[in-house]
Image (cartoon, rainbow, N blue to C red):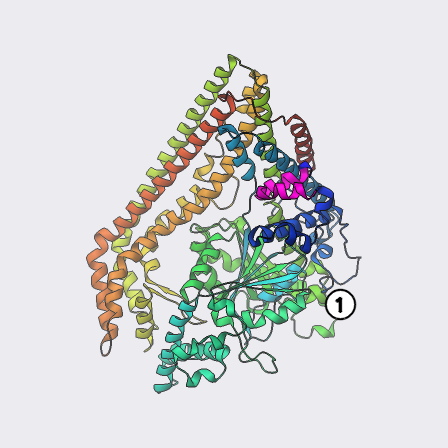
Amino acid sequence: MDDFVCGILNEWHLSELIDTFRDEGIDSESLFELKDEHIDKLIPKMGPNLKFKRRLNLLKMEQNTNQRIHHVPPQGQQEGEEATGMTEVLPSTSNTGKRNLDPLCESSKGQPAVKRKRETNSVTETRILNSVKNTMGYVLAKLNNQDDTNLKSFLKTKIKNLETGKKELVCVFGKTGAGKTSLINAVLGEKMLLPSGSIEACTSVMLKVEANKCNERYEAEIEFISPEEWEDELGSLCRTVEKGASESHDKNDDDDDEDDDDYHEAVDKLTALYGEEWREKSCEQLMEPKYFKGIYEFLHSEQKTLAFESAKELSRHIVKYTRNGTNETNTEINRWFWPIVKSVTVRVPKNNFLQHVTLVDLPGNGDRNKSRDSMWKMIVGNCSTAWVVAEINRAAADKESWDILKEISSQLGNGGECRHIHFICTKSDLVNGLHEYNKEDAQALILKRNMETKKSVNKELNKLTKLKKHFSDECFQVFTVSSEEFFRGKYLSPENTEIPRLQEFVQNLNDSHSETLNYVSGAHGILSLIHGADSRKEDSRNKEVYEALGKNVILQTELIKKEMTKIQTTFEDCLREGVVRSITSCDKILSSFLYPRKSGRGFHKQLKKAVENGGIYKPNGRGKEMNLNMKLTSSLTDSIDDEFRNTFPNEGQSGPFKGVINKFTLDTEGLKQKYKEFELQLVFLKSEEDRLKTDLEKSIRKQKKTVYRSLTKTIGEAMQVCYKKAAAFEGTGILQNMRETIEKHVYASKNFMFEDAKNVMMTQLNDLMVEVLETLQNTMKEYIEVSLRTDEHSVPDVSAELEMVQKLYEELLQSS
């Protein structure tokens, strides 16, 4: 066995297999020849066996990537045919440099962005990343073969933590029939990937699409809700159907629509899963295992994985897990499993721009099922880009699309991580009488309407003043696309479908998250530290460097603390004003919520469902969400929205706390000039300083969402007592009883409820600031201590490895 195999096993946390591989003489050449039957003999234990096979497949794919010659379709060839993989449609790239994230940029020759040849940088990065990873595997093996010490434990942890795995999420919103599925298929260049169909056959579950990094098959991973959740929902559905069947409805009443929606939703779900058999069975009988044949994973709370050779085959098999097709005719599917599916993750092989990006097709604006709704909120809060999709012929007037955008604005903005909002107008090729024109005139007609549509949509966007509190103008883009024409090319050239511009945007989003530069930079710093520790001699100047770095840490953290104190005072002032406005606006908020102008006779049922669901009513399929907690908190959030966005921006280069953390520096470059003999240690400290600031920025972005949402959360918790009391009313006078209960509670609580919300937020903000300061200060002190105060000289010789990684690091910076 050679160092390569030893390093690989250590890197994969399978060091217990080293002796076995050594005994069998497995070297770097024979490693790549291992087949499943060989691995089964070498590694009989199931856990390590599966882990090794998966990692080896990945390693083989990385090797193939280095050798693969990427093919760009000749001019005129149709793009996106099933036989054409994404490697052919979109050349590989993972440029780590500071790329322009503007999806509208095109090459100087006017070629569509998707056609650019970027194979060179991609292959360079892959080669460099693989070489450095293998090198660090060797170094880890050397450290493992020596006696353990504090420094070596520190170094081994740092090497293992070089890997990063966060993905960028692009969330796709839009009503049924807007063309979301076709849009995703076109962007991926896979016409038959995600199932699409009639308006009735709408996507009913969350659908995630990402790259398959393990093999070259099309895979679908299906996550079910738990049997317990379905049993609870099943009881509710049966009661809804029973109630709907027993009541006589006057079709002219306003409350009939809501009753009918609930009734038909219940019938759809039961019929999809059980056919007509559910009508004569009890809820207990419908939970019997015989009804879940073929999906035993549901009963065991496991995920179901399907794998296929083609996109078309995958699409045909996953449709029953993703779409409500109970109203479709001429279908071979007898049972639809979507009612018990939580989400479906589709993995696409040979895809370059989903390596660090996941596309998510989100149905509606949440879900009545609590686990699905919880996942929905988590995904929305974590997404970096939102695509709001509407048909072009009514995009500017599509109330449902604009309502979605307005309702989720706070979840995306201050309460989320979103940096880009794209309003995408689909089906741009659908123009009356288009067949009467030649291709050139037809294209001109389509492009003219596209320009008019963009102006109209931008005009509507400018009216959304609340949305602008969460996002700058630079966040918004409008696209007019034709998924059909992208594949067909009858009237429009590919670039005029604007699909390539979206592909370019996703590619850039993927590239901005490349792990290569972070990994190589970190590896270079670690090797510099090891070599510095190995070659360091006792020097009186060591104390000087140590003290200078210590002073810099104190000075820099004091500057951060000073800025944080200003921010804290500003938030305190804003929230104090928000509390006053909240108290004075209670009457108006309660009046609009409890006594709406167009309430209808069915309003008492909506309010009943709201109080049963903690103050939130989610309509079935249409209509706006009712959220009393958010309404009551609106004056508080309005008071801080502008300041919050300035303090914790999702977009831009300034970073959190108005950029003060990004300005933190140990001044290692200046110290290098004065203390050249400590250059290696200072290189390590600089790489760790950069890495720590990046990690802190990610952590702050995550935690700031909790801080912002704490206002609504605290108000919601304070309202739970009256919701429970209101939910208990039945019979005559139920509406008035619920209204009076809520009003009395708010009037009795308003003088302290809003103040409590303010205090909770300020406490969380203070805790976040303290955590950031302590992390920055303590971590950098630890690194300085390790770099300059260790007396250990028993670390391995890594001079050759450092020289090689240094050259690769410089090459990477130059290519970027």
Pick the front one: 629 or 124: 124
Q: Is residue 421 left or right of residue 742?
A: right
Task: Identify the residue under disc 1.
Answer: 439
Q: Position of residue 752 (x, y in %)?
A: 22, 51
Considering only vertical position in the picture, is 535 above or below 178? above
Magenta range? 4-26
Location of residue 280 (image quadrant): bottom left
Q: Is residue 298 visible?
A: yes
Q: Where in the figure is residue 503, as x and y percent of width and height?
A: 65, 55
Which residue is at the front of the view, 520 or 439?
A: 520
Screen quadrant of the C terminus: top right
* Local SS, label 1: helix
Compared across the picture, whether 349 is left or right of 239 comes to: right
Query: In this view, which residue lies farthest toward the front?
Result: 23
Q: Is residue 90 left or right of residue 576?
A: right
Main SS of residues in magenta: helix
Q: Residue at x 29, y 67 (%)?
A: 594
**Residue 25 forms part of the magenta stretch:** yes
The image position of residue 490, as x and y in percent, is: 74, 68
| Residue 795 higher or lower than 315, as above or below | above
Q: Give the residue at x 72% y 74%.
A: 435
Q: Tell me the quarter of the image containing the N terminus.
A: top right
Number of marks: 1
Q: Is residue 350 magenta?
A: no
Measuring from the top left, give residue 351's x and y in whole percent: 66, 55
Q: Residues within 10 Å of mark 1 (few under 14, many from 20)?
A: some
From the viewer's side, name the closer residue of 632 and 521. 521
Tell me the kind of residue under disc 1.
Lys
The answer to whether one can see residue 580 in this image is: no
Residue 246 position by quadrant: bottom left
Residue under the point 61% across and 35% down: 141
